[in-house]
Amino acid sequence: MKPLSSIFFLLFSIISFSQTKVKDTITRRAHIVFMQNGNAVTYKPETPPLIPIAGAPKPSYSYLWELGDGHYSKEAEPKHVYKTKGNYTTRLAVTNNYDNGKPPATRPKKVAVNEITDTNYKDIASIADQNGFAILKNCDPIPDQEMVVVVSYQNLENYVSSGKLYLFYNEKQFKNNNFELVDFRTYANEREVKENTVAAVDDLDDTKSYLAAAENTFKTKKYRNTTTEEDLDASLADANKTYHNVSVLEFDDANPGETRNLFYTFKTTPEMIKDTSATVTMRGIFVPSRSYKNHKIKNLEMEIVTSHDPNKMGSNGSFMNYRLVRFKRVNFKTRFQNNGEGPARMIRLETDIPDMFDKKTFQIEDMYPKCPICPKDEEPTVSCLDTIIKKNQIFFTFKNIYLPGSEQKNVHEKDSTKGFVKYSMKFAEDFHKVKTRSRTAIIFDKNEPIITNYATTRFLPGISIGVKAGYNLYPDLENPTSYFVGATISPFKSYRFYWQAEWLNSVNKYDSATNVIDEVVVNPNGVKQRQRTTTSTENKSVNWEVPVLIRYNINNYIGVGAGLQANFNVSQEQNQTIKIESFEGDSEKFIINTRTASNAVKSSFSDFKTGLLFDLTVGAARIGPSLGARYVINFEQNFNYFQFYGIWKF
């Protein structure tokens, strides 16, 4: 039989082990497998098992193949015909949808093409439908994971051209950088150049720095689709004001109609914003010819995610300035994917609408599948999007459509199974500075609804500076007068609770109690006489008060607060006057002599006091003018006082 101590030790070890969370250090890997026949190569991924998420749709993989010659494919098992002999490096980025693990890591695979047996070669597909410039991603960003961005450009001119490509990333509106550029790969001899972030576009035919005056102000533009612009100075200055980082590449000798692809690998940083409803962007600027200032602009929008879920809701209202959003349109976007084995003919999105938005300003910005708005009061017979606005919801219904399922036979392109609705609204007439949350129920035909994440909107704290002036009333002092002016700082137009700090400069004056002493003295002649000594003291000071309080706005007109206060005398002066009166004899009838003497004592930065305060304001509680009253309880006897003031917050 084991000793009792050994049994206790064994039990303790089991309990400790069961309570210790073992970190999973195993990296899932996917392998590139290929079958080759001369210059024709068929690729196939070997992937680890998927880990389903409870309650989520069936998990699946999606792929982005970089085929080593500038081509790419999003098919699961692509077949590619290489044009020339050579050694090619194929890369694969695997995205795990509805999966409870990290994306599988892959290693590049070398493919040697030693003979040309298949002449059925196809050039890179034209992107003329996107105005010759396109940006796509293999997945949405997850903190501390890698993602691939593909930038495609096409020479739409009828002559050979040489130009530049810019890819801006890491928006300045976020505190930390969201992306780190790990690597980029080119296949048409594009070369990286360095440029200052602020400078003039004097000579576009060389590699000198682009320059845009910092003092110029440019309106921020929305690039919903690829746009063509002419003012390159303004476009670069606007991008440099918006983003921290930029990659600049030059290219040469692009033939008419030729399309080229660039591949960027980004690693999202651990400090990346964690808001899963936030939208982050990258911006591409394509200068087709370095001899001209004409250029194309494309924004790539991405939602922050914690897992790769194609059914998602996001908003660009994650960090708004409350002062500037009165007439701003806030965009919302709901994405969905048909993961069924057959096509969806009807898709309904039941979306929450926060109270602070004005549903009368609702408008649809974009959608897929593309279709017109359904006619009112009649049953549609063609594909259309129906919208029903209710009190707290908007229903979007795609009718008579055909959206393939990702598990459907002969469906190779996963993107064809995805759709979205993008819409915008303005704020209502009276909206408060509060965070909102909304989500969408997605229903494919008659299946059970899929519930998305919450899309949040929130406001930056903002700064409100106030000016304050008033009168202090000291009931325990004699003949007091005290006036003050000061400043306050607090968040701009907070809804309920908020912190406020103040600095007040007061000028004070009060009298100390007058001291009178009557006595009978014997003068030098030996005669008794009455003598009265009157001592009076006047106190003057310049006082600094530094209150810090937490306030609560009961409504738009009344606010209350409480906090702590420290004050000390910056300068203090005490003037003492001594008056000596001598009377004839022992009575007060006849004054025979009066003498007066005075002295002054000055000091600075003395008499430090602390205390509690309670506050009430009536007026414009959040912004604008109001009147207030405050009672200060000092941790010193006979120095409690009332404060009456007016304040204006800006």
Image (cartoon, rainbow, N blue to C red):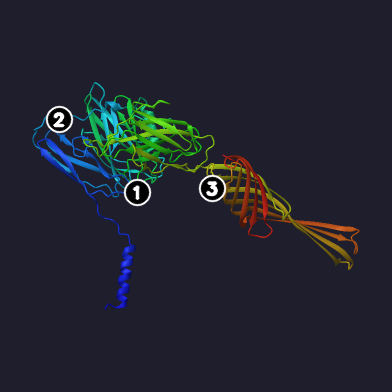
Depth check, mark 1 against mark 2: the one in front is 2
Q: Amino acid at mark 2?
A: Tyr
Asked if residue 448 can be seen in this view, the reply is: yes
Contact (CB < 8 A) between labels 1 and 2? no
Q: Seen in the image, is 89 located left or right of residue 542?
A: left
Residue at 41% over, 33% down: 423
Residue 481 at x, y = what percent?
Answer: 71, 49
Residue carrying label 2: 121
Name the foreground residue: 287 vs 65: 65
Q: Amino acid at mark 1?
A: Pro
**Cα separation between marks 1 and 2:** 43 Å
Q: Amino acid at mark 3?
A: Tyr
Would you identify the image quadrant in which residue 437 lies?
top left
> Closer to the N terminus: mark 1 or mark 3?
1
Residue carrying label 3: 498
Residue carrying label 1: 270
Under circle 3, the secondary element is: strand
Screen quadrant of the N terminus: bottom left
Residue 192 at x, y = what percent?
Answer: 26, 36
Screen quadrant of the C terminus: top right
Q: Is residue 602 above or below residue 232?
A: below
Residue 275 at x, y = what percent?
Answer: 40, 45
Q: Dot 1: within a 10 Å radius of its alpha carbon, few (fewer than 14), some, or many (20 or more) residues?
A: some
Residue 158 at x, y = what percent?
Answer: 24, 21
Q: Seen in the image, is 541 located left or right of residue 13?
A: right
> Closer to the N terminus: mark 1 or mark 2?
2
Contact (CB < 8 A) between labels 1 and 3? no
Q: Dot 3: within a 10 Å radius of its alpha carbon, few (fewer than 14), some, or many (20 or more) residues?
A: some
